[in-house]
Image (cartoon, rainbow, N blue to C red):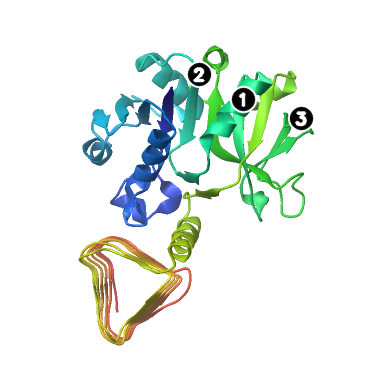
Amino acid sequence: MDAIILVGGQGSRLRPLTLTRHKSLIPVANRPALDHLLDWLGGHGVERAVLAMGQRQDDLVEAYPEGERGSLAIAHVVERERLESGGAIRNAVQSAEVEGRFLVLNGDVYVDFDLGPALAAHDEAGARLTLALCRVANPSAFGVAVVDGDRRITGFVEKPPPGTAPSDLVNAGVWVFEPDLVGEIPAGAVRVEETLFPSLVGRGENVLGYRFEGLWADLGTPGRYLELSQELASRAGASLVAEDAEVAAEARVASSSLGPGCGVEGGASVTGSVLWEDVRVEAGADVHDSILADGVTIGTRAVVRGAVLGRGASVAGGVRLRPGEIVEPGERRE
């Protein structure tokens, strides 16, 4: 079975992080986000992953060249223009000659659940389309599905106002497609979430909602990305620190991820944060609930709380960043 992974988006909601790194390459537990999806697919017997990507994505092509990756084959399909999810699926199926039932995954999700029962439920129900659904505490931020007692989806509500969601089950961005559905995707740049899916449900077609138990996260915003990183550190029982990262004995690091080449000096504190590569936190600095991209420097006794810093940014000693502040790549705060 093939899987199409939609990686053509620009990651605009993740800026400034994605100004210098493709969104599929942002580190999750010190590995590129796409690594986790590919490992998950390969572990469930998927034979080929088709990366449906936009133009000018050389970093992604270099990181995941076409060919074999363990038991999983990698193929590329490049869009000449932005096609949205529907056009990207249609283009990938035609260009990569995808045959038979296939999976589609949003490239900005993290998933860890048993795919086998979802495929079995799809077959048992005779569904034309199955959407993996995840229960969340705040469904107003997502596309919500309404499901009947037979697990058939009867309706969708996109990002309902708080307190009005008809259920707490959201579209997890993992879909099982029967091949004949491709011909029903409208021409042009369209989103299947807004066209094909509601059309099938409106006609009474068999669209299955499979609720899974497991870890899921949407990496589309810095806040959600940070929450996932904190959850993975919590599950590991310790901060995730790269082998060559250096943490002084007098420093405190908790519920965080530190990538290769990072350094935390004595008296500094890093809690609930993600440090990419070659990040320096100098003596006495305090970093909390923040994301620091490659090459960031936090000066002596600086305080960074709830901030996002782009590649090569720096904060001078003694400076305080307020929650919600964004520092652009290469910018220096003094």
Cα separation, mark 3 vs mark 1, equals 12 Å
Point out the tag, 3 or 1, that comes first from the N-terminus: 1
Q: Position of residue 295 (x, y in %)?
A: 23, 64
Point out the tag, 1 or 2, that comes first from the N-terminus: 2
Point out the tag, 2 or 3, that comes first from the N-terminus: 2
Q: Residue at x 35, y 55 (%)?
A: 17
Tag 3: Cα neighbours inside 10 Å, few (<14), some, or many (≥20)? few
Q: Which residue is mark 3?
A: 150
Q: Position of residue 73 (x, y in %)?
A: 30, 27
The amino acid pointed to by label 3 is Asp
Secondary structure of the residue carrying tag 1 is helix
Is any part of residue 171 visible from this angle? yes
In the image, 210 versus 105, the foreground residue is 210
In the image, 155 versus 250, the foreground residue is 250
| Mark carried by residue 105 | none
Q: Which residue is mark 1?
A: 122
Q: Which residue is mark 2?
A: 101
* 322 lies above or below 149: below
Secondary structure of the residue carrying tag 3 is loop
The amino acid pointed to by label 1 is His
Is 152 left, or right, of 262 in this rendering?
Answer: right
Tag 1: Cα neighbours inside 10 Å, few (<14), some, or many (≥20)? many
Is 273 left, or right, of 283 in this rendering?
Answer: right
Cα separation, mark 1 vs mark 2, equals 10 Å
Secondary structure of the residue carrying tag 2 is loop
Contact? badges 1 and 2 (CB < 8 Å): yes
Q: Position of residue 318 (x, y in %)?
A: 32, 86
